[in-house]
Image (spheres, rainbow, N blue to C red):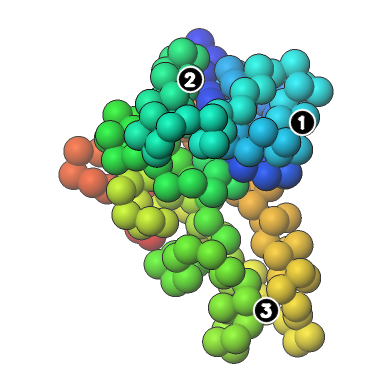
Amino acid sequence: MTEKPTAIVVLISGSGSNLQAIIDAVVQGDINGQISAVISDVPDAYGLTRAKQADIPAIAVTPKDYADKAAFNRALSDTVAHYQPDLIVLAGFMRILDSAFVKQYHGHMINIHPSLLPKYRGLDTYRRALEAGDQQHGVTVHFVSDELDGGPMIAQTAFPVEPGDTEESLQQRGQAQEHILYPNVIRWFCDGRLQLADDGHVYLDGERVPC
């Protein structure tokens, strides 16, 4: 385990349920990291309230406050850089990141997506799974790349689609799995067990991750 806690910046856009799971894991000592800041592109996102309640700096960087997308991207990048993160965690951040930003934090930025990637990239994954008649659904954690929901996969958890499931019931079970999987992956990274190698493959404890 690394001695110095990993500096983590979390990017959010909404209620921050995954953020809360991560905060709880840090407080309980399950993650050898410190959340240096929570940043949202939505000024009234409830996740910012969660951060404040945990005495974590909570910052809104809102697109409407900037002249154009490039200016917003610079502001977001500068705000993140101020906290010198070792790891950036996207926890329901609903904005596509600038390619320069993604390149800067290559191998140090992860995302969680509510599907068994590469199935159902993008939005409305629960509805799409139900419409397709899938027998299982799941969640995936992956490193972030320029490709939407297409970066190298780290871990997946699958769960059955049950008779009578709705989008809401499927989402509830999916989020319950997210709140377990995401803190686990973050713990691996903070303990130095998880790497994205130069060959583009993900390694955990020195072994290539098969997914």
Q: Are marks 2 and 1 in contact (CB under 8 Å)?
A: no
> Where residue 183 appears, x then y in whole percent?
61, 39
Near-viewer residue (182 or 63): 63
CA neighbours of label 1 inside 10 A, class few (<14), some (14 to 19), many (20+): some
> Where residue 95 appears, x then y in whole percent?
49, 46
**Above or below for 145 versus 3:** below
> Where residue 26 appears, x then y in whole percent?
67, 25
Kindly give the residue lying farthest to the front in the view shown: 67
- Sequence order check: which comes first, mark 2 or mark 3? 2
Mark-to-mark CA distance, 1 and 3 = 31 Å
- Sequence order check: which comes first, mark 1 or mark 3? 1
**Residue at horizontal 34%, vertical 39%?**
98
CA neighbours of label 2 inside 10 A, class few (<14), some (14 to 19), many (20+): some
Side of 6 where 13 appears, left or right: right
Under tag 3, what secondary structure?
Answer: loop
Near-viewer residue (69 or 80): 69
In the image, what residue type sits under mark 2? Thr
**Above or below for 49 versus 150:** above
Tag 2 residue: 79
Under tag 1, what secondary structure?
Answer: helix
- Sequence order check: which comes first, mark 2 or mark 1? 1
Tag 1 residue: 50
**Above or below for 55 versus 151:** above
The answer to whether residue 203 of the structure is visible from this angle is no
Query: Residue 72: which quarter of the image?
Result: top left
